[in-house]
Amino acid sequence: MKSLRQLYKIGHGPSSSHSMGPAYAAEALLRRVRDPDRVKVTLYGSLAKTGRGHHTDYALASVLGADRTEVVFDTETTDIPHENTLDFEAYKNGRLACRMRAISVGGGDIEIEGEGVKTESEVYPERTFYEIANTCRKNGLRISDYVIEREGRGILDYLARVKRAMWDAVDRGLSTSGVLEGGLNVERKAQYLYEVGRTNERDAARENRLVCAYALAVAEENASGGIVVTAPTCGSCGVVPASLRYISEVEGFDDEKIIRGLAVAGIIGNIVKTNASVSGAECGCQAEIGTATSMAAAALAEMYGMQLDQIEYAAEVAMEHQLGLTCDPVCGLVQIPCIERNAVAAMRAIDALSLSRYLSGTRKISFDLVVETMYETGRDINEHYRETAEGGLAKLYTDKEYYK
Ligand code: SF4
């Protein structure tokens, strides 16, 4: 498995696969052809169908230069190697200087045809939770110690940056109001939810309200193109920061505990990315929000000092009950249902943690099995529900204002 640096990317939203990945691919093109006169980029599959809403064209133009970039949304071609395929043609001095095909495989990673995935080398020989747990048990390590052993102590500094970027996104989101761009007229609600509490509010209601406010804050930042951390993707970037920040505030957990939690969350995200997918275009929202919920639940279990079995149970429960979750972003924007979905998932992560305290000894399903199941389910989900904005809410929603 790759370094956690590869999983947690700090950058602009709204989409790791549809804006970050294509931007990285454009940078790769400019390393091949310096200063081209003109670049034509053809988007296929999910990129073509939801690229406008996900700002793929802006992301490409921001790297290549708006005045020399032509973006074609080809929704007809189906003979493509992956749902997120894009072709570049760069022209220089009046002739075609370079053709390059790239695939945005999810989480901001790209694969250039003929080169493979452009990422760092493998730093973890283990690939599954089972293998990692065995290594930890044999050597008397917690998973966070195992991360430090494999990556070196430098990873702690990187995770401290990740934590700061996550907390900053919460703060920015909580202090911003207004309507999100895109045409759906979606209002930012994090600030309202944060401030609306009553003096006689019950503890459970307060917890839900604050966790949701934090998740909305980050997801709204993402929707507006603000800086977020892929955890594991941009669309699902609110789940981990919301649940970790809320629980840290309540319990007084310090930075070291939070960073160790992020290390464990990163391992969970890496296991899914390695053995299945974190791409909504490939496996639906279960791959994004489902994985984010598992990451958050496992991180919380680590922060409470829980045992390996309990960490695994928390991650497993969090994913198992989101199997089949579809991706149907209205108008191809990362707004409905994505923003609220982050809030609901952050609460679920805390629920999964609660169950794992008492029930881990009774479980029959391993985390690895639920990951395998998620992947198979995702491959079976009709393509209308895999980030094409052709099914579900994206199909049935109209701008009739039902509730007025
Ligand atoms: S529905 Fe889920 S997978 Fe699809 S764009 Fe929204 S957050 Fe991402």
Image (cartoon, helix red, strand yellow):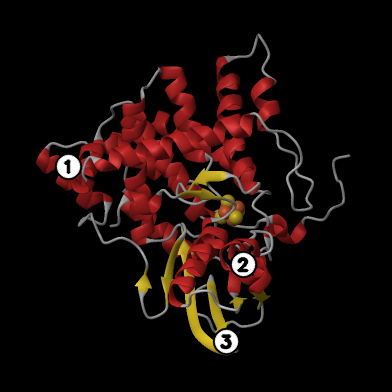
From the top left corner, tell me how far across and down residue 292 is, in percent.
Answer: 46, 45
Q: How far apart are marks 3 and 2 (CA)?
A: 17 Å
Which residue is the site of mark 3? 93
Choose mark 3 or mark 2, whichever is in front.
3
Name the residue rendered at 75%, 44% in the picture. Answer: 186
How far apart marks 3 and 1 lie (CA) works out to: 58 Å
Q: Residue at x 34, y 60 (%)?
A: 274
The first of marks 3 and 1 along the sequence is: 3
Residue 207 at x, y percent in the picture: 55, 22
Classify 84 as above or below 269.
below
Question: Disc 1 or disc 2, which is closer to the eye?
Answer: 2
Q: Is mark 1 on a helix, strand or loop?
A: helix
301, 48: nearer the viewer: 48
Q: Name the residue under label 2.
A: 65
Determine crowd level at label 2: few under 14, some 14-19, many 20+ residues with C-alpha closer than 10 A: some
- Can you say which quadrant of the picture contains the N terminus? bottom left
Q: Is residue 217 left or right of residue 144?
A: right
